[in-house]
Image (cartoon, grey):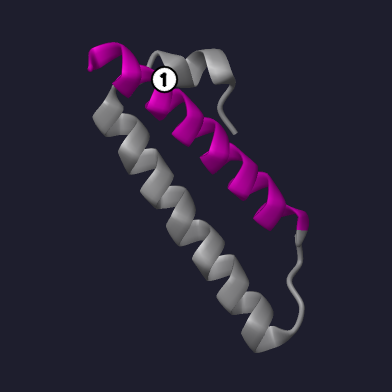
Amino acid sequence: MAKQNEMKDLSIDELKAKASELDREVFELRNELAFNRKIEKPHLIKAKKREKARILTILTQKQAVVA
């Protein structure tokens, strides 16, 4: 998980790519949970969703400055 200061240095395109990557990871974790009814690290779902929220917040801030 990247720190918020490190994420602020990323470009808008890099932030969008990171957000879509996290979307895919959460999707895969949820699928694993649905199929197996159990995953090794269930806390990762919540952590990845929070990281995506942080990225989207930074992305929104950057886009507001540009516009």
- Where residue 11 sits, quadrant-wise, is top left
Disc 1 residue type? Gln
- Between residues 41 and 5, which one lies in front from this camera angle? 5
Regarding mark 1 in the picture, which secondary structure is present there? helix
Chain part drawn in magenta: 43-67
- Between residues 34 and 57, which one lies in front from this camera angle? 57
57 lies left or right of 18: right
Q: Is residue 20 above or below residue 65?
A: below
State the residue at coordinates (77%, 78%). Answer: 38
The percent position of residue 61, horizontal first and vertical second, equals 41, 20
The percent position of residue 4, horizontal first and vertical second, equals 56, 19
The percent position of residue 57, horizontal first and vertical second, equals 49, 29
49 lies left or right of 24: right
Residue at label 1?
A: 61
Q: Is residue 62 above or below residue 57?
A: above
Q: Is residue 22 above or below residue 60?
A: below
53 lies left or right of 64: right
Which residue is outermost to the bottom? 35
The overriding secondary structure of the stretch rendered in magenta is: helix
State the residue at coordinates (60%, 67%). Answer: 29
The percent position of residue 17, horizontal first and vertical second, equals 32, 41
- Where residue 18 sits, quadrant-wise, is top left
Quadrant of the drawing holding the N terminus: top right
Quadrant of the drawing holding the C terminus: top left
